[in-house]
Image: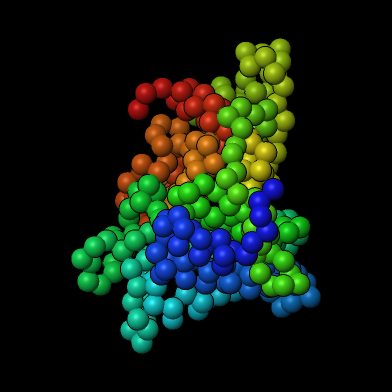
């Protein structure tokens, strides 16, 4: 069991003792955590607040925005604009990047986020979450442009999410393993409850939206079919299935007890590489998974090695217990 210290103390120790993070990054992560706390309070209110239901607008992805999507986005923008640690932000809910206004000092970090992932679950009281990723602004870049964000996930300096479920839990890596912090609502602070998480290399639990089976490519059909055959099939063991339809909740389960998550390319929209977004969903989640001893690919290559071409680029995702990810990836053959 981890020693019960605050997120602030953990980050100070990561800065001072482990030398893993500079002061500005520590400040940034504390601001993001405070923003997640605010979002958690808004989510927690549910129908008692004014934030349920649709906002009557669409985001850049063409998805109907929930009121809480917009509120969460605004909370993250307002919390991070003035601190002097950021140069710009990018969000699933905004077409283009958001520059820090000139009235505030510019920092050296770029913050990307999905402010409220899984928001279709809001109205049915199922876990949702905020996903964030931190990159460094390229050296020598005077202003900041979209192209400065287009860095592979291996360049992240911090990544995490906050899942708003029975508990509000912040999960974070700065490259020194994965730590979990549970929000103590009485104290109003995140408290370390797990650290150095390790995902079992094997699992008997897969997560995929089975209703899309007829649209999958052959390798994914083969992998899932073998799981479904259970102990009488080539795997020689039975599998269980989970699908929350909230990536944050599914990844949190995998970080907590193992499993494999798949959202593969399918032929419904063949021009798209997948449904999930590379920069602010797949990259942060993949780094967390790898930091916990798991693996994450798009079926053909390590997700963190993908060179992004567009800010809102989509990607096929297979992540979780290392041996299962490697098996499913091997079925896709060589690139
Ligand atoms: P489907 C939520 O909208 C999301 O982006 C992820 O959080 C989740 O894993 C996926 O989409 C669910 O997609 O097609 O099963 O509703």
Residue 238 vertical placement versus 319 (above, below): above
Q: Position of residue 58 (x, y in %)?
A: 53, 66
Q: Which residue sits at x=35%, y=27%?
A: 335
In this view of the protein, which residue sits in the foreground, 34 or 274?
A: 34
Report the number of discs.
Answer: 0
Figure check: 176 above or below 321: below
Q: Position of residue 188 (x, y in %)?
A: 69, 72
**Does 228 sit left or right of 267 as displayed?**
right
Q: Residue at x 54, y 55 (%)?
A: 172
Q: Position of residue 156 (x, y in %)?
A: 40, 53
| Residue 220 appears anywhere in the view | no
Res 254 visible: yes
Left or right of 61 on screen, residue 191? right
Looking at this view, is 284 or 11 the one in front?
11
Residue 10 position by quadrant: bottom right
Relative to 219, say whether 89 is above or below.
below
> Residue at (57%, 24%) from the top-left corner?
223
165 left or right, relative to 289: right
């Amino acid at each position: 069991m981890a020693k019960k210290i605050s997120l602030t103390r953990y980050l100070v120790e990561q800065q001072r003792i482990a030398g893993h993070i500079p002061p500005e990054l520590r400040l940034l992560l504390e601001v993001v955590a405070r923003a997640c706390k605010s979002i958690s309070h808004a989510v927690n209110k549910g129908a008692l607040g004014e934030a349920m239901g649709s906002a009557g607008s669409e985001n850049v992805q063409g998805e109907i925005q929930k009121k809480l999507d917009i509120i969460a986005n605004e909370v993250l923008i307002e919390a991070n604009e003035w601190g002097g640690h950021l140069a710009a932000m990018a969000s699933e809910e905004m077409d283009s990047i958001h520059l820090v206004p000139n009235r505030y000092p510019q920092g050296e970090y770029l913050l990307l986020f999905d402010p409220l992932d899984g928001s279709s679950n809001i109205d049915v009281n199922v876990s949702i979450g905020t996903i964030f990723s931190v990159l460094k602004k390229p050296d020598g870049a005077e202003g900041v442009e979209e192209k400065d964000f287009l860095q592979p996930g291996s360049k992240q300096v911090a990544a995490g999410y906050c899942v708003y479920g029975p508990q509000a839990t912040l999960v974070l890596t700065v490259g020194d393993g994965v730590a979990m912090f549970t929000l103590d609502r009485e104290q109003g602070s995140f408290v370390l409850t797990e650290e150095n998480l390790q995902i079992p290399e094997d699992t008997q639990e897969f997560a995929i939206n089975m209703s899309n089976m007829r649209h999958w490519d052959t390798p994914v059909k083969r992998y899932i079919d073998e799981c479904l055959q259970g102990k009488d099939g080539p795997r020689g063991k039975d599998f269980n299935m989970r699908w929350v339809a909230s990536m944050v909740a599914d990844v949190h389960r995998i970080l907590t007890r193992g499993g494999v998550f798949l959202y593969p390319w399918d032929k419904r929209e063949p021009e798209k590489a997948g449904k999930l977004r590379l920069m602010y969903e797949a990259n942060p989640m993949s780094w967390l998974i790898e930091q916990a001893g798991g693996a994450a690919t798009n079926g053909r290559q390590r997700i963190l090695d993908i060179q992004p071409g567009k800010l809102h680029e989509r990607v096929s995702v297979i992540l979780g217990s290392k041996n299962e990810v490697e098996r499913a990836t091997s079925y896709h053959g060589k690139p």
